[in-house]
Amino acid sequence: KNEVEQSPQNLTAQEGEFITINCSYSVGISALHWLQQHPGGGIVSLFMLSSGKKKHGRLIATINIQEKHSSLHITASHPRDSAVYICAVNLSLGGSEKLVFGKGMKLTVNP
Amino acid sequence: DGGITQSPKYLFRKEGQNVTLSCEQNLNHDAMYWYRQDPGQGLRLIYYSQIVNDFQKGDIAEGYSVSREKKESFPLTVTSAQKNPTAFYLCASSIFGTGYNEQYFGPGTRLTVT
């Protein structure tokens, strides 16, 4: 069983829709990351959170530590939001931190 | 502008040849990481380095080697011992010792071995 599970694996939406991407994890963590990977391959960090909620523009990330679950919400979606969204969790590794990644969720937003 | 550079973006090699992927950062980060990404799989950690002249194996280190002679540089060599080297390789860096740390990623190198 993967330590980080994302759902759905693929999602197609129409421009303007509200989108939710889910991430569940099975181990104790110190932090959770949401990352965005565009078709060219480069990865951008969207959020790092350990509790509660964070908002940046049209993106909102929430985490429930007790339930080991996080969601990434995109309001008023736009075709430029089309990307792979990756959830990753921080695990302790020999005094440093190791990231364990989910497989990612491919989002396509049609105009 | 601070950031991480990886070169080249695309790399083609013949089977049996060693190849070195470059990763440079000017963020003054102590820690650097190499990941491999295959279709349908999450990123997997190959090697990481927390400080100059020191590095540790990640989950899939077999067939790879690294060096960390300078804080800014963490090159990865894919050796002929790596059974399935064709993949997308990502380098990342972070501040070491902050408890939990945000990792900054480079643009990646897509390696194709035929």
Image (tube, helix red, strand yellow):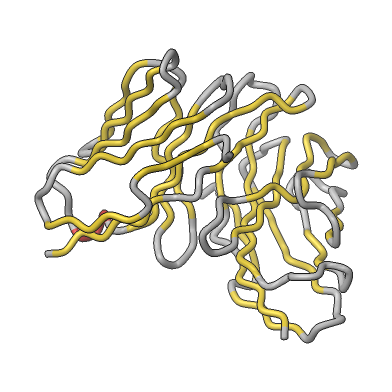
Outermost residue, top side: A66
| The one of B1 and B50 positioned closer to us in this rendering | B50
Q: Is A53 displayed left or right of A75 in the figure? A: right
- Which residue lies at the image location 60% right of the left edge and 52% below the top edge? B4
**Residue appearing at x 85%, y 74% in the figure:** B18
> Residue at coordinates 48% horizontally, 29% vertically from top-left?
A32
x and y, in percent, of residue B84 in the image: 74, 70
B88 or B83: nearer the eye?
B83
Count of residue discs: 0
Residue for point 45% across, 22% down: A68
Coordinates of residue A24 in the picture (x, y in percent): 44, 31
Above or below — where is A102 with respect to B86? Answer: above
Q: Nearer the viewer, residue B73 or B11?
A: B11
Q: Nearer the viewer, residue B8 or A102?
A: A102
Q: Is residue A59 left or right of residue B87?
A: left
Relative to residue B86, is residue A15 depicted above or below? Answer: above
To which quarter of the image does residue B48 belong? top right
The answer to whether residue A78 is left or right of residue B73 is: left
Q: Quadrant of residue B52?
A: top right
Left/right placement of residue A98 relative to residue A50 reads: right
Give the percent coordinates (x, y) of residue A23: 41, 35
* The C terminus of chain B: image quadrant: bottom right
